[in-house]
Amino acid sequence: MFSKLLATVPLMLATWAVWPDTVTIKDEALVKGPKIRLGEIAELRGEHAATLAELDVGPAATPGNAKIVDAALLLSRIQNTGVDVSNMEVQGAKSVRATTLSLELTPEVIAEDLREFIATQMPWDAADATVDVYPPAKSEILPDGQVAIRWMPNPEYGWVGPEVFRGELVVDGAVKKALLCKATIQAYGEVVVAAQDIPRGAVISQADLTTERRTLGVSKEAGFTRPADLIGAVAKTSIFTGQLISRRQVEAPKLVKRNQIVSVEVSYGALVVRARARALADGREGDLVPCATLESKEMFQGVVRKDGTVVVD
């Protein structure tokens, strides 16, 4: 009995050695895309199964949609690889419906992602701001994979008021689509307001100022948050009690007036020479003003320092 079994082994091995490649086509299949691989739409057996599984049989449908692939096309693709199809069995369906895998990003998911991005980027504490995000009108259909949204705000945006944010939809590290999503940020904080009427031209003092919690304007630069930043400034317009003081309503005080005799400093290395001269124009801190020497009337220019001294480089 055992000898008979041994005698059949060579025959079995010979049969296995010539066992044909078998391609069994599925009726329906899910494919990743953007190309359809033979191994996704057919069951493969035989010597060339591993190689045939990676065979590109054509472009896939767009994510979420299907494409019909005929068996005749598959056989043609296999022949082009150099595989001997005369010893191959093709069975199963006459065609396969290949549906491309997809992911759906709903408007709600997109809006929540933008909300989280804003919360991490805005200069306001979450307790001092409200964020309203307006979801896009429709879902975004994407290829299957690891999805992320890369938001790109306008660099000029002050993180308060309405803004349209541009986003890139990234799948497995590659940008697939762009989208737009609108949001409005409202921030609240302590701002400086007038404690009493301040007439035009008046020098602002501590007694003129107080702070209140208010809605911030369209830019965080619109007002002041510290009274100290306003003390000594000059009101360009009349400011009334309770009014938010904006940067457009004030200006730095004039430290130098036209025809005023001013102190002048000239540096020569470590040597500093001090003199006096006549200012020929008004000047505030940082202004470049023309001056004339008292004796020779020779003209020169210098920068007004915080203490009113004109510094000549």
Image (tube, rainbow, N blue to C red):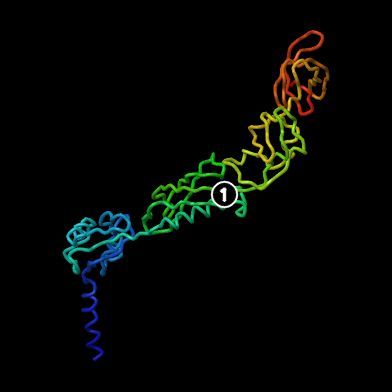
Residue 281 place in picture, x, y as percent:
72, 17
Q: Provide residue 196's location: percent of width, then percent of height.
A: 73, 38
97 relative to 211 in the view: left or right:
left
Above or below, 284 against 111 in this view is above
- Front in this rendered view, residue 244 or 242: 242
Report x, y in % for residue 133. Answer: 49, 52
- Under mark 1, the amino acid is Gln
Quarter where residue 310 is shown: top right
Which quadrant of the view contains residue 249?
A: top right
Camera-side residue of 97 and 180: 180
Q: Is residue 132 left or right of residue 85?
A: right
Q: Which residue is mark 1?
A: 121
Residue at 46% in and 51% down: 134
Please give the count of numbered marks on the rendered protein: 1
Secondary structure under the numbered disc 1 in the rendered image = helix
Judged left or right of residue 281, residue 95 is left
**Which residue appears farthest toward the top when viewing the image?**
296
Q: Position of residue 146 (x, y in %)?
A: 43, 58
Q: Quadrant of the C terminus?
A: top right
Q: What residue sits 81% from the left and 25% below the top?
A: 270
Q: Residue at x 49, y 55 (%)?
A: 113
Residues 136 and 191: in front is 191
